[in-house]
Amino acid sequence: MEIIQLADRENRIVISKDIDFLNSHLIKTQPKKLIMVKTGNIPNKPLIEIFNKNLDLIIKMLQRGDLVEINQSFIAERKK
């Protein structure tokens, strides 16, 4: 996937709902950093509110690890 290569080359974080990105991350560690959104089908406004409300926590989690999973009721991290 070109997006993964670009993200890794430019040290970016991929944000996705697509399970293929999660599988690639878990199997090949590509992308290097991933925010996996598991909120189901919700409008953009509530999704943006989740990110805005928890941005500091998400940043801290990404500094400690390489995978953050976001749900409507929790945020979890996988540490390195």
Image: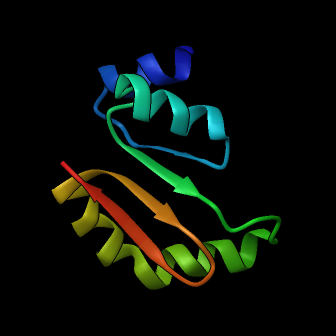
Is residue 16 rendered to the left or right of residue 78? right
Is residue 14 rendered to the left or right of residue 33? right
Is residue 27 rendered to the left or right of residue 21? left
Is residue 71 rendered to the left or right of residue 44? left
Residue under the image location 22 percent in, 68 percent down: 60
Residue under the image location 63 percent in, 32 percent down: 20
Which of the 4 image quadrants contains residue 68? bottom left
Q: Image height check: is 32 above or below 79?
A: above
Q: Image height check: is 13 above or below 24?
A: below
Residue 1 in the image, given as x and y percentages of width and height: 57, 15
Which of the 4 image quadrants contains residue 75? bottom left
Residue 65 in the image, given as x and y percentages of width and height: 23, 53
Residue 41 in the image, given as x and y percentages of width and height: 83, 65
Residue under the image location 30 percent in, 76 percent down: 56
Residue 28 in the image, given as x and y percentages of width and height: 38, 22
Residue under the image location 47 percent in, 23 percent down: 4
Nearest to the observer: residue 78 or residue 34: 78
Nearest to the observer: residue 47 or residue 41: 41
Q: Image height check: is 14 above or below 3?
A: below
